[in-house]
Structure formats: structure tokens, C-alpha cells
Amino acid sequence: MKYWIETYGCQMNKAESEALELELNHNSWEKAENPDAADLAIINTCSVRETAEERIWGRLGFYKRVKKNNPSITLIITGCMAERLGSKLLNESSPVDKVFGTFTKNNIIDFLLEKSDFNTNKHLYEFNKVHTTEGKFKSFIPIMNGCNNFCSYCIVPYVRGREISRNPDEIFTEIEKLENMGIKEITLLGQNVNSYYYKNSETGESLDFPDLLKRISEKVKNIEWIRFLTSHPKDLSDKLIDVMAKSNNICRHIHLPLQSGSDAILIKMNRKYNSDFYNNLVQKIKDNIPDISITTDIIVGFPGESKEEYNMTYNIMNNIKFNEAFTYYYNPREGTEAFNFDDNIPKEEKVKRLSEIIQLQKKITVSKKKEKIGNTIKVLVEGFSKNNSSELIGRTESNEMIVFYGKHDIIGLYNMVKILSLKGNTFIGEIVS
């Protein structure tokens, strides 16, 4: 029996798909070369933005055609869109055979094994175990799930549920297994990773995110880079900054969503901080970790955003100079508070504002990268370049892409690489040692 998995959305989805793949392999399933050759297809969905769901509807049209040629294929939909829409994905014209939401995804294997005792009702979120497949050297580790923030535009609390933090002993055990498998880099995952908090009901001992990060940093031996995603500004503490500043294996990189530079819009978004707080936080991070790389998320065209308020976002981006920014224009999400707001900004204006901040960020990103030309940096070699099979591709500590010539036997290892030039958004380098 052969399977095919498609994953859309965040790194948490990718981690959960990889865990599912491991379970399938363990139960004697084999990965198909393409959907047409599969006995089972699983689509792990995202629901954060309308465009993400539109893409899934398009894939369902594709699978209608697949089923005409292969009527026996089983199509399962899981993930956040499955949680949000549920049985609406099942109808006479739909190619979908079964829907498993965020809280029931762990029942997929039981369903495939035709076990009759699995629970299809919502239950407590269950964390998967080791999240890597043979031959890989980077791994995601979910440490918490869900969100308590209820930003007015965001569907996540409704499809992922309230925050739940994973037992730290499970996390430490998983990391030890990953080290034994040869993993060189881990990324700790959560919708709001720095709100992690676990209290042992037996001992009374509590652990917050800086505590957890510090212990992981001290425990690992062969894992040289530790990353984490994603941080909410209100929860990024002085304690966390201090842990990062004193560590030599926690990557100097923070993803810190701003969303808007307008205090009035931040209030409407229910972000629980203002622009002064955010600016001061960024400055504090830079003062304590001078070589830090900071990336962000930006939404323009939020309901009621005036031209002046949009300019505030443009100006704060220009002043802070993020290394990268993931930018979007506002799309209403049914089920969120903002869905009931008056979406009074024409799409043409939203697109115009988005285009302007994209161009601004491109200039900033190129400028910051050009400053690094001539530097020799540590790089984790990931594999061969897609554009040139004689070149290798790697990532820097700041998660920037770099290509260089080298032998295949250094894939999965760290190497020192000198940055020679910049081509588009990618560094060109040469191995120093």
C-alpha cells in the first residue's frame, strides 16, 4: 500500500505530517512517487488565510480527476481547515472520504488499520513523538499548541484550541533521540512558543520558556543550532533575551510579528502591545544581542486603517529595518471577531499598500545582506542546489540561503563559508574550512 501526503501552512503542520509519515512507514506503508500512484492521499490543511483554503479547494478539484482514474484511492483531509469546516468537506460531489480535525488527527492510523474503538470526537490535543525521518539532519519539535490571545483577525485559537504545553521530560527525551539519530539543528514550535509554561502536578516545579530553552541549550551535545517559532511580542521577556545572549547554540534569530505600526489598529487587532512597546523591545534585543536577525509579519489594509495609519507601519519598518518581513493584505476570516468589522478598504488600495511595503522590505533586505559580503560565517549544508547540481546549498544562523561548490559528503555538516556576493536573495560563497 502506498501513501501521498500534501502539507500546507505552518511548520507545526509540517511537523505533524512528518510524524504521520513515520507512523505510516512503521505500519508498512510506502511513499508513492505521485498522487496517481497512491492508495491513500492525505491533505494537511491550513486555514489562516482565505488564499490557503482556496488552494485546498483547487486540490480537491484535482483529486476528483485522480479518483476517476483510480476510484479505490482514499482521500483524507486533516489540519486546521478540516477542523473549521468539518463535515462540510463531505458531500456527494466531494472526493473526500474522511475528515480528521486538529484534535482527531492522531486517529488517522487507527482508521486506516480499521480499528473500531477510535474516538472521532474532540479531545485533548496530543503531541506526536520523534519528528524526523531517516537521513535528515534538521527537526521540528512541537513544545506547545494552541493560542489564548484571540487576535481579532486570527482563526488559530478556534481551530487549534487553547494553549497547552508539553511535558518537558517528553521534550528532553525526544531531543536525546534526535541527537542519537544525527540531527544537527532543532526548531522548537508553538503558535505562541514563548508562552510555554508547564507545572508538574506532583513536584510543583514549574518551567517557563526561558527555563526550558536554557535547559535544552545546556543538555544538547551534538545539536549546534536551536531555533524557535513563533514569538508574540508581549511574551518575549528580559529573561529570554538574557538566555539567548549567554548561549552559544541558540540561533541569533527571532521572528517577532509586528502586524501594524498604528496603535489604534493594534488595539482593533487585540495585539496587547503598542508601537512604543514594540520599538523598545526590538532595541533591547539589539542592545543585548548585537548580531541578532529579526524577521516579522505585517498586515496592511485592516478594517478602518487610514492612509496615515498605514504610513505608521511603513515608517516603523523603515526605522527598524527587519531582515525579512512576511507581508499580507487583510482578508476576512469567518469565525473571527474582525469578520464582523466593516471591511471598508477597497482591494485595489490594499494591493497598492502591500506592494509599497514589499518594495521597501526588498530594498532593506538587500542592503542588510550586502553588508555581510566578505564575512566568513558558519553554515549548515542542506543539500544540492536545485538550479545547479554541482553546487551545494546551505543556511546561515540567520536562516539565509547560500550556495557554494563542495563535495556531497559535507551535506548535513557545518562548514565555514566566505560570502563572496549576492545573487537575487541568495548569497554566493566558497568554503573556507
Image (cartoon, rainbow, N blue to C red):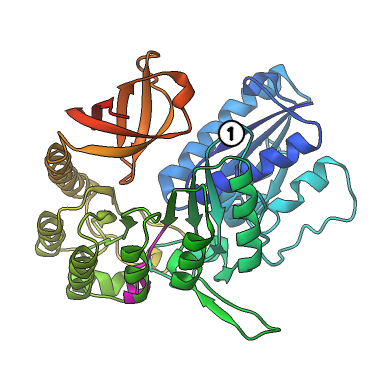
Seen from this angle, which residue lies furthest bottom?
204
Q: Horizontally, is 318 left or right of 229 in the view? A: left
Figure check: 93 above or below 290 = above
* Residue at image coords 14%, 64%: 309
Q: Residue 279, position in %: x, y?
A: 18, 69
The kind of residue on which mark 1 rests is Leu
Q: Is residue 235 magenta?
A: yes
Q: Given the current orientation, which residue lies at the most extreme front position? A: 433
Q: Which residues are the magenta region?
A: 229-238
Say which quadrant the C terminus sits in.
top left
What residue is at 35 percent from the left and 37 percent from the top? Answer: 379
**Left or right of residue 405: residue 333:** right
Is residue 68 visible to the viewer in this orientation of the structure? Answer: yes
Q: Which element is circle 1 on? A: helix
Location of the N terminus by quadrant is top right
Residue 151, percent across and down? 39, 69
Residue placed most toward the observer, 94 or 173: 173
Q: Is residue 255 left or right of residue 34?
A: left
Question: Vertical placement of 267 versus 428: above or below?
Answer: below
x 56%, y 50%: residue? 81
Q: Residue 371 magenta-drawn?
A: no
Where is residue 17 drawn, in percent x and y?
A: 61, 43
**Does 355 sit left or right of 124 as displayed?**
left
Can residue 195 be seen by looking at this rendering? no
The part of the image, by quadrant, that contains residue 355 is top left
- Measured as percent of width and height from the top left, residue 272 is found at 32, 76
The residue lying toward the viewer, choosing from 26 and 75, is 26
Instruction: Report how many numbered discs are placed on residues in the image.
Output: 1
Residue for badge 1 = 60
Judge by depth and name the residue closer to the eye, 253 or 424: 253
Task: Answer above or below: position of 329 versus 263.
Answer: above
